[in-house]
Image (spheres, coloured by chain):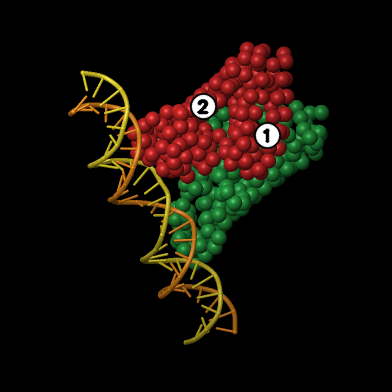
Chain colours: A green, B red, C orange, D yellow
Amino acid sequence: MTRSGKPSRERIVAGAADMISRRGLSATSIREMAKHAEAPLGSTYHYFPEGKQQLATEAVRFTGEWVARSLRKELEAGPAAGLSAFLDLWRGIVVESDFHAGCPVLAVAIEEPPADGVPPALVAAAEVFEQWEALLAASLREHGAESEQASQLATLVVAAVEGTVAMCRAKRSTQPLDRTAEQLQALIAAATRR
Amino acid sequence: MTRSGKPSRERIVAGAADMISRRGLSATSIREMAKHAEAPLGSTYHYFPEGKQQLATEAVRFTGEWVARSLRKELEAGPAAGLSAFLDLWRGIVVESDFHAGCPVLAVAIEEPPADGVPPALVAAAEVFEQWEALLAASLREHGAESEQASQLATLVVAAVEGTVAMCRAKRSTQPLDRTAEQLQALIAAATRR
DNA sequence: CCCTGGCTATAACGCCCGTCATAGTCTAGC
DNA sequence: GCTAGACTATGACGGGCGTTATAGCCAGGG
């Protein structure tokens, strides 16, 4: 029986996502991830036999799906509501961690790949960004935005929020998020008005 | 005499900025920074007696001032020209490094600070972001943008570009930059039109 | 000519890393 | 009860880390 209610494997992935969002992938050791999830080191190699890369990949996908779920749900009420949910989600993470945590997908995205080939975690990060953009773009199109404009705006929203979260951490303030939020909200309102 | 023309100290700082922009701060060792700058390890501790933190801080400030110089110059021709220069600068870094390098300021911004106090490199990152925003906002105000709107738009530009650069690296494509560029250009045109 | 002070060379300190191997424990199903 | 397989415990491997200490080089000024 596992110590805490949930099965270990998922706890390890969720904990890894949290740690990666704080310190980055290379600064997070497998030993620390195991300890953070109250799991033995041996278990991580039992559940993730490909090692650190596999764990990182699953952490990225886990975060991606978690955010996408929230996005899908809130986008039912329209793009403006979806944007608000997206902003609030990241604001919550930044504030509740006292400006220590951010987005694990971004953290993985800026890791340099080795000279030969692209690591799976980086591919997963690209796919997650793509998914978030696609959800936003589809909703924008459903609400009257022209197709090309919808794609561009969706990319801008994801990029701006990711960048803003990082700026908030550096400044230890949510002011960047407040400013970005207002600009993006106005943009979405204008794009869906026609 | 130093091996290559320039004094060692500056070469170390510039090289550190490049390496940090690729691998992040914690994944970049002082030994590698020294080797990359063709300088002996001992020299790094001679020039930067506070160690890694000091070197990181100077690398962030170095990049900040380098970008600010380009921004100041191009902003003389107006906010749209400044934005173009900002975008082209990062596009060049991403493309010329084959999607391996990004922004060292962002890389430092997402490093988790220790429980006690904020490391100087993180403070420097916040100041650099602030400086870039201030330059853009001032130019926007000079060209007819309302004050609050100028601040918000400047923050959005910096955040969006930082986020977009990271997305380009993950996707190994400049498409995000192309999309973000079009959106931001339209925004700046609209804000300075009145 | 020597000496001072900026720079380099080399080695060591203790620590943590990713990964692997091996042996042990526990539990579910027969 | 017993066996198979899922999980855990433990320790080792080679290697890189940040940092410090110490001794050596070598130009320039007196």
Residue B120, visible in the rendered structure:
no
SS at badge 2:
helix
Identify whether D17 is placed above or below A1: above
Q: Position of residue A18 (x, y in %)?
A: 52, 47
Identify whether C22 is placed above or below B78: below
Residue drawn at x 62%, y 47% is A125
Chain of the residue on which disc 2 is drawn: B
> Depth check: A10 or B184 in front?
B184
Q: Position of residue B51 (x, y in %)?
A: 37, 36
**Which amino acid does the dot numbered 1 rest on?**
Leu
Q: Position of residue A8 (x, y in %)?
A: 52, 60
**Which amino acid does the dot numbered 2 rest on?**
Gly
Residue drawn at x 54%, y 40% is B22
How many marks the image carries: the answer is: 2
**Residue with the mark numbered 1:** B177
Identify whether B11 is placed above or below A2: above
> Depth check: A89 or B101 in front?
B101
In the image, taking residue A146 as reference, residue B24 lies left or right, namely left
SS at badge 1:
helix
- Mark 2 vs mark 1: tell me if same chain: yes
In the image, taking residue B184 as reference, residue A110 lies left or right, namely left
